[in-house]
Image (cartoon, grey):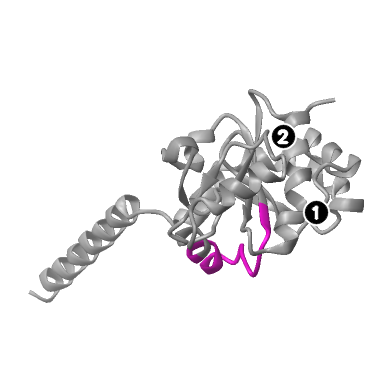
C-alpha cells in the first residue's frame, strides 16, 4: 500500500512538472528581450557608427544593444495618422521639437539641409512638432524660416512626450534618435546638434551604409 502511494505521488509530481514546462513554452516571452533579439542584425550598423560619434555629434549615444523604439503615434502631412512602423525599410532620424524651444529652432535649418542632402528612398528626417496650444504656429514658423524640405509631422496632444519621458528618451528638448531600416533604434541624442555638419553627414552616411 505504501509503495502504491509513493508511486501515485511520483506520478503527480511528473504531471506537475510537465504542466509547468508546457506553460513555460506557451507563456509570452519578455518583450524587451525579444526586441533585442529581433535587432541583433542592427549591431553591425551600430558598431560602424561608434567611431563616428565625434565632433559635432560627439554627444550622440550609439546603442550597444539596438532594440525597437517606443511605440509612438503622431500625424503626418495632411494630419494623416502615422507611427514609426510606416517608415520601416527606411532609416529615419526622428527629431522632437517645439517653437518654444530655442535650441530646437536653432537646429531646424540644419535638419532641413540634412534632409535635402541625404533624403531619399532609404532615408528621411522625421521632425515631429510637439506644440500643444496653437496648432498653426509651427507651420507658420517653418514657412517664415524657409524650412521647406521637411514633411510636417506633429503631436498636438502631447502624448509622445509622455511616452518618451517614461522610456528615458526625453529629459528636455530637442531629442533625436535614429531608427534603422529594420525598425531598430541605433542611436539617441538628448540635446541639439549641428546636423548639417560634415561630422553629422558622415555619421548618417555610415548609418545608411553609403560611401
The 10 Å Cα crowd at callout 2, few under 14, some 14 to 19, many 20 or more, is: many
Q: Which residue is under mark 2?
A: 115
For marks 1 and 2, the one nearer the N-term is 2
* Residue 174 among magenta residues: yes
- Near-viewer residue (43 or 196): 196
Task: Give the structural element (helix, strand or loop) at label 1.
Answer: loop
Q: What label sits on residue 193 in the rendered view? A: 1
Residue 208's x, y, as percent? Answer: 73, 31
Looking at the rendering, the stretch of residues picked out in magenta corresponds to: 162-176
Q: Residue reaching furthest left?
A: 1
- Near-viewer residue (80 or 206): 80
Query: Do the residues under discs 1 and 2 have CB atoms within 8 angstroms?
Result: no
Residue 26's x, y, as percent? Answer: 30, 50
Residue 173's x, y, as percent? Answer: 66, 63
Task: Give the structural element (helix, strand or loop) at label 2.
Answer: helix
**Structural distance between the alpha carbons of marks 1 and 2:** 15 Å
Amino acid at each position: 500500500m505504501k509503495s502504491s502511494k509513493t508511486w501515485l505521488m511520483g506520478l503527480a509530481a511528473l504531471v506537475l512538472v510537465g504542466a509547468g514546462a508546457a506553460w513555460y513554452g506557451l507563456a509570452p516571452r519578455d518583450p524587451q528581450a525579444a526586441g533585442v533579439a529581433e535587432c541583433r542584425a542592427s549591431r553591425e550598423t551600430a558598431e560602424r557608427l561608434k567611431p563616428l560619434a565625434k565632433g559635432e555629434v560627439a554627444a550622440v549615444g550609439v546603442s550597444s544593444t539596438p532594440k525597437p523604439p517606443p511605440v509612438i503615434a503622431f500625424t503626418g502631412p495632411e494630419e494623416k495618422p502615422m507611427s514609426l512602423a510606416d517608415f520601416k525599410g527606411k532609416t529615419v532620424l526622428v527629431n522632437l521639437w517645439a517653437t518654444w524651444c530655442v535650441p530646437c529652432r536653432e537646429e531646424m535649418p540644419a535638419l532641413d539641409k540634412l534632409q535635402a542632402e541625404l533624403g531619399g528612398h532609404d532615408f528621411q528626417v522625421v521632425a515631429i512638432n510637439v506644440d500643444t496650444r496653437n496648432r498653426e504656429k509651427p507651420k507658420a514658423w517653418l514657412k517664415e524660416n524657409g524650412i521647406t524640405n521637411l514633411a510636417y509631422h506633429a503631436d498636438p496632444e502631447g502624448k509622445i512626450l509622455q511616452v518618451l519621458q517614461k522610456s528615458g528618451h526625453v529629459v528636455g528638448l530637442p531629442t533625436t534618435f535614429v531608427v534603422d531600416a529594420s525598425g531598430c533604434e541605433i542611436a539617441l541624442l538628448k540635446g541639439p546638434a549641428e546636423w548639417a555638419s560634415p561630422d553629422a553627414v558622415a555619421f548618417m552616411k555610415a548609418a545608411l551604409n553609403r560611401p
